[in-house]
Every structure is written in C-alpha cells, then in structure tokens.
Image: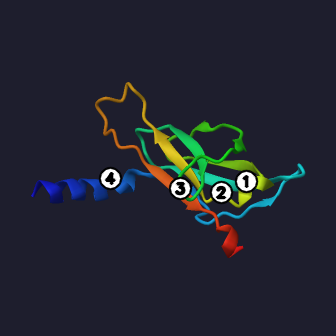
Amino acid sequence: MYRSVALCLLLCSSVLGHEMTPTYPEWQVSYSGGIKKTTMRLWNSREDVQYYEIGVFDDEWKPIPFVTSYKIMKVDYLSQVKFDVYIRETNIKDARYICSLSKLRSDNVSKTLLATRICSKFKAAWEL
C-alpha cells in the first residue's frame, strides 16, 4: 500500500516540474569559427524553485564542456528564459543530452524537496 501511495505522489508531483524545449535541439552555425550553438527555452512551473543548472552530457552522462551566459539561471515562477548554448565542433559528436536541474534552496525545509531534471536529446553522430 505504501508503495502505491509513494508512486502516486511521485506521478502527481510531476505536474510541478519544469519544461525545456526543443526536445530534440539541433546545432547551428555561430558567429565564431569552430563553435556551434543551439537555442533553448526553459519554463518554470514550480513555485518553490527559482534556479536551474544547465549541463551538457555524453551517452555515459559524463559532462561535456560548453558555454552559456549563466550555468545556473534564475527563472521566476510561471516565466520563461531563452538561452544559447555554445560548444566546440570537436565536442559535437560526443554531446548527447542538454539538461536543466532544479536547484533547491537550503531554507526551503518546509517545502517538498523534489529536484527535477529535464533533458533534451541531440542526435548521435551516426544519426546525422
């Protein structure tokens, strides 16, 4: 019984997550040679979270070097932020996921402590 209650709470709480689009981003030419970029949109539907950390990962979830305006960005409740992610062309073949992770504040002890991670997936080198 407790398992089904926990599962229900987990599924019901997914409504309180955040959203990052596009789901399948594509790399575009940037203004610098040897660098590609993609533009993402992050939407916050969590009243208890204002900060999100951005990361780029390979197939084995190892971090890939990238640049963006802010790796941790503030997104107010029910608002969105558009941001560009830049990566070297030499790392494109390894980049598989771009993720946003909700950052919980330490003074938020009375609220639900459920961190959410949303990922978008790049096409693999063999799919290009």
At label 3, the amino acid type is Glu
Cα separation, mark 1 vs mark 3, equals 14 Å
Residue drawn at x 53%, y 41% as measured from the top left: 52
- Say which residue label 3 marks: 60
Which is nearer the N-term, disc 3 or disc 2?
Answer: 3
| CB-based contact (under 8 Å), mark 1 and mark 2 | yes
The residue nearer to you, when weighing 101 against 42, is: 101
Residue drawn at x 66%, y 63% as measured from the top left: 25
Which is nearer the N-term, disc 3 or disc 4?
Answer: 4
The residue nearer to you, when weighing 124 against 108, is: 124
- Say which residue label 2 marks: 95
On screen, residue 116 versus residue 36, left or right, reads left
Mark 3 packing: few (<14 Cα in 10 Å), some, or many (20+)?
few
Cα separation, mark 3 vs mark 2, equals 10 Å
Q: In which quarter of the view is residue 36 placed?
A: bottom right
On screen, residue 68 versus residue 57, left or right, reads right
Q: Nearer the viewer, mark 3 or mark 4?
A: 3
At label 2, the amino acid type is Ala
What secondary structure is found at the residue carrying circle 2? loop
What secondary structure is found at the residue carrying circle 3? loop
- Say which residue label 4 marks: 13
Which is nearer the N-term, disc 4 or disc 2?
Answer: 4
Cα separation, mark 4 vs mark 2, equals 30 Å
Q: Quadrant of the C terminus?
A: bottom right
- Say which residue label 1 marks: 91
Cα separation, mark 3 vs mark 4, equals 27 Å
- Residue 46, position as x, y percentages in the image: 43, 45
